[in-house]
Image: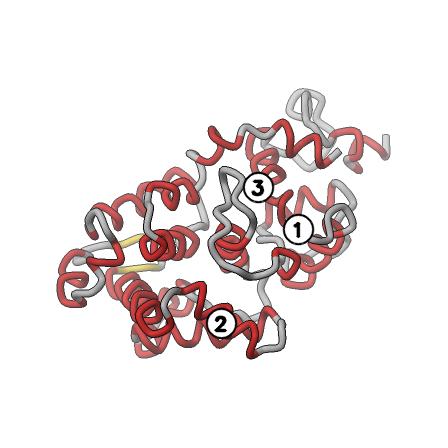
Amino acid sequence: MLRGVEARCDRAARREADPVGFVHQYQSLADQEIVALLASCFAFGNVKALRAKIADVLRRLGPSPAESLEDAARTKRALRGFKHRLYDERHVAALLLGARRLQRRDGSLGAALVGAFAGANGELVPALVEWVGAMRRLGGLDRLSGNGAAHILPNPEGGGANKRLMLLLRWMVRPADGVDLGLWPLPPSALVVPLDVHLHKLGRNLGLVTRKAPGWKSALELTRSLAAIDPADPTRFDFPLCHLGMVQDCPSCRDPVRCEGCGVRPICRHWAEN
């Protein structure tokens, strides 16, 4: 049934309503990595509002974000006055400058992560701890105080679902399919679903998750459930499921009007139990 949801997903239309749409506007790997990092770090809250803020940052940086970040002083001037929820100009500048410096050091963000993954013996979280830590140090995020500095590129060992980091990895690692880009040579089987409260609710409705809190353990549980369908690429179902929940406005209850036409209604616990 999940394969049917995947087949019916209008990827082209949904991509343009998703932060990943910005990544597809660029051609060079350096620009795609910078834009993907920015878009994923902003991927919380109202989608329309966050897309507007991503577009604002990209407009300020100019046609090649990676090239513009070669000049730290220019970058800071370009971002002057920027504000989005927890983030201000200092947080965004530190994030992007750290990413560009890591690109220069290791050749690309993907190469840096591949090296960290190998050094961590194929363990995802320790690799991300090293990778995130390098970007934070290189950009000076560790020297900034406040919630914005901690939130924009968080410690992967913090206990949360790491939704935005997992979203970035899905975009950059999964095989190119019109949404994800397949740019980083890591095994898709190592990825974990980018779990948020909406996908957690949908996962519980479908019996794919039993835990009540949408944390890291729930993300692993959902990933294991999806790996039973495709062990080599379990996160392939994330995009269609996420956008199914958005399109249907999943009510997490038996609602004949809002549930009409839902592709997973036959296996939803709210319908199976009645």
Query: Badge 1 is on which residue?
Result: 233
Identity, as a three-letter code, of the amino acid under mark 1: Asp
Kind of residue at badge 3: Phe
For marks 1 and 2, give the one nearer the viewer: 1
The secondary element bearing badge 1 is classed as loop
Q: CA distance from mark 1 to mark 3?
A: 13 Å
As helix, strand or loop, the secondary structure at mark 3 comes to helix
Q: Residues within 10 Å of mark 3 (few under 14, many from 20)?
A: many
Question: What residue is drawn where x is 67% and y is 42%?
Answer: 202
Q: Which mark is residue 155?
A: 2
Image quarter (top left, top right, bottom left or bottom right) of the C terminus: top right
Q: Position of residue 136 (x, y in %)?
A: 37, 73
Closest to the observer, 128 or 254: 128
Instruction: Give the residue pinned by disc 3.
Output: 239
Q: Callout 2, which amino acid?
A: Asn
Q: Secondary structure at mark 2?
A: loop
